[in-house]
């Protein structure tokens, strides 16, 4: 079964993660980096059930699980919520990464078995073809939005640095 590329998931997760940092006005401290680290790992994590995904080579759960079932379900989302009880920022980041991953997959051709094993058929919102020109277009749009958001962050940083100077 086909999957969105890891790159696409990382771009989407990072974009949403950076927007959340800005909207919730998280200050730039170690916790913010823990949060964004969680987002990056979380945006790849569900694909441990895919043989050809890079993360599947490190954690080969694809040997036991069918693609887009348990690791693309409500249960993994709830597991990430539980992790927030252990480490708030990492858990929150993992939650955002995993949720954006599953949402993206729900817009693809094969969908996700979000309520696995209660419902064994996949749910989906749209039928975007993965590994295709359509996915490339999405990546370009998300990449462009990400550049804009990073630009806003750079302006913030410049403003912050200029305020810190005595002239
Ligand atoms: Zn996936």
Image: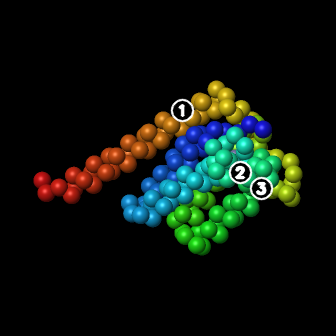
**Residue shown at 77% from the left, 46% from the top:** 67
Residue 151, position in %: x, y?
38, 42
**Residue shown at 47% from the left, 41% from the top:** 146
The nearer-to-camera label among 1 and 2 is 2
Colour scheme = rainbow
What is the secondary structure assignment of the residue under circle 1?
Answer: helix
Report whether 111 appears left or right of 18. right
Looking at marks 3 and 2 on the same chain, the residue that comes earlier in the sequence is marked by 2
Q: Which mark is residue 140?
A: 1
Q: Are marks 3 and 2 in contact (CB under 8 Å)?
A: no
Looking at marks 1 and 3 on the same chain, the residue that comes earlier in the sequence is marked by 3
Crowd class of label 2 (few under 14; some 14 to 19; many from 20; radius 10 Å): some
Q: What's the distance in space between the residues labelled 1 and 3, CA to CA?
A: 30 Å
Crowd class of label 3 (few under 14; some 14 to 19; many from 20; radius 10 Å): some
Q: What's the distance in space between the residues labelled 3 and 2, CA to CA?
A: 14 Å
Q: Which mark is residue 70?
A: 3
The nearer-to-camera label among 1 and 3 is 3
Crowd class of label 1 (few under 14; some 14 to 19; many from 20; radius 10 Å): some
Q: Quadrant of residue 77?
A: bottom right
Residue 1, position in %: x, y?
78, 38
Res 111 seen here? yes
Q: What's the distance in space between the residues labelled 1 and 2, CA to CA?
A: 30 Å
Residue that label 2 marks = 60
What is the secondary structure assignment of the residue under circle 3?
Answer: helix
Report whether 98 appears left or right of 118. left
Residue found at the far top of this picture? 133
Relative to 119, is 146 above or below?
A: above
Res 20 seen here? no
Residue 135, position in %: x, y?
64, 32
């Amino acid at each position: 079964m086909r999957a969105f590329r890891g790159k696409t998931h990382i771009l989407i997760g990072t974009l949403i993660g950076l927007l959340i940092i800005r909207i919730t006005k998280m200050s730039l401290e170690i916790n913010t980096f823990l949060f964004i680290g969680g987002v990056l790992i979380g945006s790849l994590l569900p694909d441990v059930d895919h043989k050809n995904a890079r993360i599947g080579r490190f954690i080969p759960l694809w040997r036991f699980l069918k693609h887009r079932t348990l690791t693309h379900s409500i249960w993994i989302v709830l597991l990430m919520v539980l992790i927030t009880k252990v480490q708030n920022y990492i858990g929150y980041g993992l939650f955002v990464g995993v949720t954006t991953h599953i949402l993206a997959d729900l817009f693809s051709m094969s969908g996700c078995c979000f309520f696995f094993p209660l419902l064994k058929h996949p749910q989906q919102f749209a039928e975007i073809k993965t590994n295709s020109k359509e996915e490339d277009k999405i990546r370009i749009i998300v990449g462009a939005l990400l550049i804009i958001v990073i630009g806003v962050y750079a302006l913030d940083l410049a403003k912050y640095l200029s305020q810190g100077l005595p002239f």
